[in-house]
Image (cartoon, helix red, strand yellow):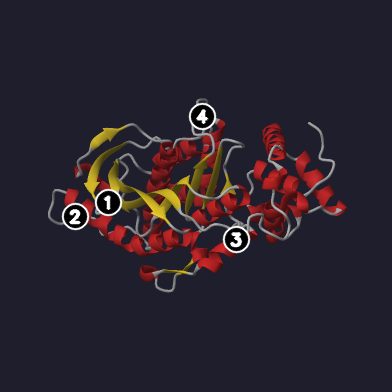
Amino acid sequence: MAAVVQWTGREAALLGKAMRLPIRVYAEQLGVNPKTVTRWRKHGTAIKLLPETAEMLDAMQLRCTPEMLATFHASLAESEEVPASDKQPLEAHPTGPPALGPATVVSHRFIPLYVGEAVQAIPGTPQAPGPGGLGHRSTPAAHPTADVQLHIYDCGVVTAHLVQRLRVETLGELAAWRYRTATADLTWTADRVRELYPARTPPWTTTPSYVLSAYLLESSPWKGTDLDAALQLLTTPSVLVDRQNPQKAARLGDEVERQLLREGFAHPDVIDFGSPAVSLGLAGWSGVAYHPLAQERALPMSAVAALERDVQTLWALSTHVLDEIEAGRDPAMPKDFGWRFLRGAYSRLTAARPQETAQHQLMREAILATSQLPDRLRAAQEALRDSDT
């Protein structure tokens, strides 16, 4: 494949995406400011890079694997097919202020609760294992506004999966809704799990403490760089709201949202797992955003959700282990779910499978990297191994 003759912001941005590097990491390796990478993404060919920067990008390209190079050149070819009228000028938005909405989004919330050995008494229908190979059962639960399945894992965790289709006028409205309803859904999950336990007083003392979200963007007015920025805002909603009182989180307003869309907001720690001409996908610490471009070839949202459920479940399990160690106690684990189980789960989640498509692999790697679950699993595994001796 030919080398890049003239590096512009377009080529520089696409190389980082092909390497699946978060903006912050890519910028550090090139020796530039993360805002520079964001600017490349936004303004593309309108930015001509200096010879010194071009040399650094030439060196970066030489480090790419054949798969990365194939993705890079496919992305270049795809972007060259975009009509000139659709490309973003340097200083002005091509059609005036970017649209704020409306958009249709399917919200997936994953809320885990560690219950330990008590999980054996909670009823449910057996289900096929997910990507982590975790045995579990499930049962539906009645929620005021969402469709819910409670997934009851043999390792001692119950993970609630709440699905809700929303039509919102702005992404800020969605972000504020997310913060305002999170506490209520944590309480709702704790109450439903207690109701399933046959004894009057459940033996566990933990309560759900966090919500991870994944959003499927079904329809919107955004295209091109506006769509890229909107997916970033779905992944990182905190920039759209005043969170001083999370239960009464307020949207910051139209101008803040328009500015972020216009400037091409991109969080430096978000990882791109989209596939050229097939889908847009982003994974961050607080969630995932996904938008199919070719429905028949894109990942089904069920694949993203299956991985997220296993990730949340193992996060809750490893958090229990590390919290017990920090409190000076040896963790009491359900039978057959000690350090060897965690070692096996780590291997299943991090190793590529022969039947796994390239899209699945990229999605899995991005979600695991941003969740920091592998490091947590290793720490919990070592803690359990030490407590056995």
Amino acid type at circle 1 is Val
Displayed quadrant of residue 362: top right
For the residues marked 4 and 2, what is the alpha-carbon distance in whole angstroms? 40 Å
The residue lying at 76 percent from left, 49 percent from top is 45
Q: Residues within 10 Å of mark 3 (few under 14, many from 20)?
A: few
Judging by the rendered image, the residue that carries numbered circle 2 is: 202
Dot 4: element:
loop
In this view, the residue in front, 266 or 98, is 98
Binning the other alpha carbons within 10 Å of mark 4 as few (below 14), some (14 to 19) or many (20 upward) gives: few
Between discs 4 and 1, the one toward the N terminus: 1
**Residue marked by disc 3:** 97
The kind of residue on which mark 2 rests is Pro
What amino acid does circle 3 point to? Pro
Residue position marked by numbered label 4 in the rendering: 356
Q: Position of residue 323 (x, y in %)?
A: 38, 59
Contact, mark 1 vs mark 2 (Cβ under 8 Å): yes
Of marks 3 and 4, which one's residue comes earlier in the chain?
A: 3
Looking at the rendered structure, the secondary structure element under dot 3 is loop
Q: Which residue is mark 1?
A: 115
Q: Earlier in the sequence, mark 3 or mark 2?
A: 3
Please tell me how crowded label 2 is: few (under 14), some (14-19), or many (20+) other residues with Cα within 10 Å: some
Helix, strand or loop for disc 2: loop
Question: What is the spatial separation of the Cα atoms under label 1 and label 3, in whole angstroms?
Answer: 50 Å
In the image shown, does 241 or 268 lie closer to the viewer? 241
172 in relation to 87, above or below: below
* Mark 4–mark 2 CB contact (< 8 Å): no
